[in-house]
Image (spheres, rainbow, N blue to C red):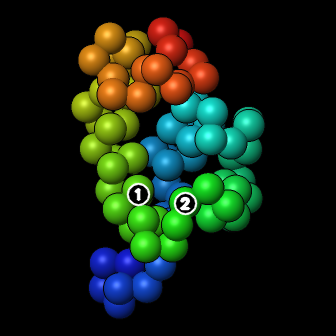
Amino acid sequence: MGDVFGKPAIVTDTHCIRLSNRIGLVDHIKDPKKVEMALWKLVPPEEGNDLCHRFVLHGREVCTARTKPYCDRCCLSDICARTDV
């Protein structure tokens, strides 16, 4: 929706769900629709699409799932609920 039609959208893929929980934006929510609804309370509509792209990049490069996250080089470490996971 966001990339193709320019409509406000939050794609709750695995990166979005994992990072939203790990950072502390949501609290142990795994259901994609519930994560999306919780994020809409925090994110302005015009930022939703970019947020998803940033989650993917951040999840691949810094806050990785299969290895220990690189918290020492994370730009969110000062606000992250799970630093040094």
Q: Secondary structure at mark 1?
A: helix
Mark 2 residue type: Val
> At label 1, which amino acid type do we have?
Cys
The residue under the point 32% across, 11% down is 72
x then y, percent, for residue 69: 39, 18
From the image, tell me which residue sits under label 1. 52
* Residue 9 in sight: no
- Residue 59: image x %, image y %? 36, 37
Using the image, tell me which numbered label, if any, was put on residue 7: none
| Residue depicted at x 55% and y 60% | 43
Quadrant location of the N terminus? bottom left
Q: Secondary structure at mark 2?
A: loop
Where 37 falls versus 21 (above or below)?
A: below
Q: Which of the 4 quarters of the picture holds residue 36? A: bottom right
Q: Is residue 55 above or below residue 66?
A: below
Q: Is residue 38 left or right of residue 44?
A: right
Q: Residue at x 35, y 85 (%)?
A: 6
- Give residue 13's position: percent from left, percent from top: 49, 55
Q: Is residue 25 left or right of residue 72?
A: right
Determine whether 24 is above or below 2 in the image.
above
Q: Is residue 38 visible?
A: yes
Please tell me in which quadrant of the rendered image residue 82 appears.
top right
How packed mark 1 is, by other alpha carbons closer than 10 Å (few <14, some 14-19, many 20 or more), is some
Q: Which mark is residue 43?
A: 2
| Quarter residue 20 falls in | top right
Q: In terms of sequence position, does the residue under pointer 2 or pointer 1 come before the other?
A: 2
